[in-house]
Image (cartoon, rainbow, N blue to C red):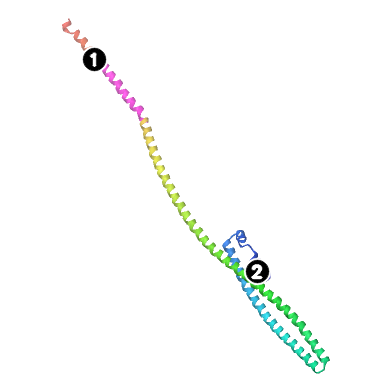
């Protein structure tokens, strides 16, 4: 690819579109900047060669114009000497040189147009390069900001997890306490039937003792009535 076509592609490209398509925008913009810098060096080198060629063409033009004037002077001299034949020959030489002057002038005009185009393209490329460098700087700042925010988010997430685990442990302890209370209530209910049976047994034993005492009293009273006095 030639210098100018490559430079035109870079200048006419949409930098944002290229970055959107890139897997690594930061790497992509570095490559674009490097390409622009390399192209700018090549274009400036080419401009230097074109300027050197123009100077050479300008010297050729100046020399050709001087030669044309010389042959015109010679034609005038021949006329003053009555040598029209020599004047014709001198004018023929002058005409040939004037044709060369026309060619060199056209070459210079094309060279001037080329130089103007180079200056315009270099200016555009320099502006694009400045924009790309600014975008690179902004991207680096955004990258650092994003990394910092990610670190903060991770730290916040860790703190949130710690808080959540602390709450969970607290909830677990509360559940343990509630379960312990419930188990205590169940334990009381398990021993209640045995205790009631024991109390019932005591009550039953008390009744038997009362009955036994009653019978003993009755029997003692009966024995008193049937003693010696009754005889």
- As drawn, the label of residue 184 is none
Answer whether residue 79 is magenta in the image: no
- Which residue: 61% across, 73% down? 41
> Which label lies toward us, 1 or 2?
2
SS at badge 2: helix
Sequence-first tag of 1 and 2: 2
Residue 44 image point, x, y percent: 63, 75
Query: Magenta segment: does it hold 203?
Result: yes
Q: Residue at horizontal 79%, vertical 87%?
A: 93
Q: In which quarter of the image is the N terminus?
A: bottom right
Residue at mark 1 to residue at mark 2: CA–CA distance: 135 Å
At x 67%, y 77%, the residue is: 50
According to the picture, the residue beneath numbered tag 1 turns out to be 216
Horizontal relation, residue 151 to residue 128: left or right: left
Q: Which of 116 and 146 is in front in this view?
A: 116
Residue 7, label in figure = 2
| Residue that protrudes farthest toward the left in the picture | 229
Compared to residue 135, the image places residue 174 above or below, namely above
Q: State whether residue 136 is above or below residue 101.
A: above
- Mark 1 nearby-residue class (10 Å; few <14, some 14–19, many ≥20): few
Residue 229: image quadrant is: top left
The image quadrant where one finds the C terminus is top left
């Amino acid at each position: 690819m030639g210098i100018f076509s490559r430079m035109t592609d870079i200048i006419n490209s949409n930098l944002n579109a290229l970055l959107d398509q890139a897997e690594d925008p930061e790497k992509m913009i570095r490559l674009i900047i490097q390409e622009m810098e390399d192209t700018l060096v090549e274009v400036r080198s080419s401009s230097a060669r074109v300027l050197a060629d123009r100077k050479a063409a300008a010297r050729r033009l100046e020399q050709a114009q001087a030669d044309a004037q010389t042959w015109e002077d010679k034609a005038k001299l021949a006329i003053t000497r009555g040598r029209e034949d020599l004047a014709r020959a001198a004018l023929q030489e002058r005409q040939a040189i004037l044709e060369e002057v026309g060619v060199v002038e056209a070459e210079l005009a094309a060279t001037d147009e080329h130089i103007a185009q180079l200056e315009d393209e270099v200016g555009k490329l320099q502006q694009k390069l400045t924009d790309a460098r600014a975008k690179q700087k902004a991207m680096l700042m955004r990258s650092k900001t994003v990394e910092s925010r990610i670190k903060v988010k991770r730290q916040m997430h860790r703190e949130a997890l710690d808080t959540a685990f602390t709450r969970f442990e607290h909830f677990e302890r509360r559940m343990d306490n509630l379960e312990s209370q419930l188990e205590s209530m169940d334990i009381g209910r398990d021993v209640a039937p045995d205790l009631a049976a024991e109390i019932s047994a005591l009550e039953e034993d008390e009744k038997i003792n009362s009955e036994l005492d009653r019978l003993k009293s009755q029997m003692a009273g009966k024995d008193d009535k049937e003693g010696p006095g009754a005889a």
